[in-house]
Amino acid sequence: MPAEKKPIIIYGGSFDPPHRGHMELAAAALRQLKPQAVYFVPGFHTPFKDLRPVPFPERRALLRAALAEAGLLGRPEVKISSFEAGLRRVVYTWETVAHFRALHPGAPVFFLMGSDCLEGFKAWRRWRTVLKGARLLVGLRPGHALTALRGVPFTALAGRFPRAASSDLRSALFLGEKPPALHASVLARIAARGLYLARERALLKKIITPRRFRHSLDTAALAVRLAPGLGLPAQKAAAAGLLHDCARDMAPAALKKYARARCPRAPFLKTMIKEAPVLLHAWAGAARAAALFGVRDAGITEAIELHATGAPEMGPLARLIYVCDLAAPGRDFPEAGLVRELALRDFGAALRAANYVKLTYAFSGGGWVHPLSVSLWNSLQEKKKG
Ligand SMILES: [Fe+2]
Ligand SMILES: [Fe+2]
């Protein structure tokens, strides 16, 4: 067959991060179709979606590392395309297919995907146009049977391919885990470049005690686990959980000075300084997260500010961190485990329970209780009745 008549394969995706599942699918497609080209096409990422999104040049470098370890880099058919990333906007698959068809007139075009993607194919923008331009090439992923979709013909790849969802891998990376679905060289590059909050974790480790660092990781892990149920992005949950206590180990005098200078609008600042200075670490933490970690996200800022006191009108991320801080594994009071269990079943109930536990401890200690905590209690009681 003349080279220009051999098929081309388009492999689109976020590749955020690229993993073994991607490589095995591509290797099988190369074996089965013997194409003239396989184009990996990492998509464009909207910069405001995450605290620190992984930009295209970094994802391309990770992809090259994965391809090298899988023995695919350097094969003349294997190419990484900047087509979608270069357009600097969300690019639909029908556009990508049209682009590569025009590059290879006369060549059969295949669009490669796992069976997990096939299930939702009819929700894709202009999916019929995609099918006019390319034939789907689908690899079987566990838990996602290759079932025919009416009006969606496809070619099945021989073999079974590992289950590896980029979103799960990202969540693990945010917490500093090393998922086996990632190649060693990909993990090494992520660490070296400080991606997926690695930079934030390294800096945090330097400014809080090891015990506090462990608690921050525990809080982040619980927050990441609960985030999908509340419709929150894992990355924001992880960042807020990691950073919520970033000012907790400042020396008392320095904390007061910092809070006076940087948090003049913290509610009841003067009374806190006098009556409950430990609470200052929440507002000081938000200021520090902005100054040291570049946090600009209003939801993360609010979550750090309110994690200790709560507040009646706090947003969903702040509610999440308020509960997770109290209920994190490793907390040494018995209610933590109970609130954690509750949070997995009924988050609203867990929020009320967390507020109850915090207030009970505050009252039993005697002294001043922050009005925001009491207001939260009252607002939750009103909502319960309403
Ligand atoms: Fe705290
Ligand atoms: Fe905490």
Image (tube, rainbow, N blue to C red):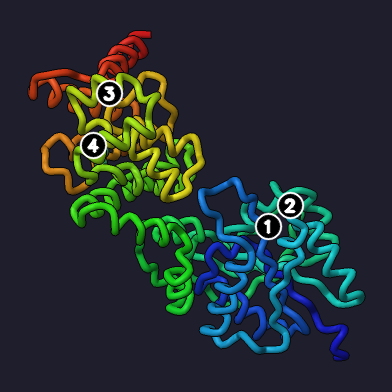
Say what secondary structure mark 3 lies in. Answer: helix
Mark 3 is surrounded, within 10 Å at the Cα level, by few (under 14), some (14 to 19) or many (20 or more) other residues, namely some
Kind of residue sitting beneath label 2: Arg
User: Which badge, 3 or 4, comes first in the chain's sequence?
Assistant: 4
Name the amino acid, label 3: Arg
Q: Residue at x 58, y 46 (%)?
A: 49
Amino acid type at image mark 1:
Phe
SS under mark 2: loop
Which amino acid, mark 4? Answer: Leu
Q: CA distance from mark 3 to mark 1?
A: 41 Å
**Could you tell me how far apart the alpha carbons at marks 4 and 2 are, in whole angstroms?**
40 Å
- Which label was assigned to residue 352? 3
Q: Nearer the viewer, mark 3 or mark 1?
A: 1
Q: Which mark is residue 89?
A: 2
- Rounded to the nearest angstrom, the CA distance separating label 1 from label 4 is 37 Å
- Residue situated in front as seen by the camera: 258 or 96: 258
Decide which of 97, 381 is in the foreground and name it. 381
Residue 330 x %, y %: 17, 48
Image height check: is 102 above or below 93? Answer: below
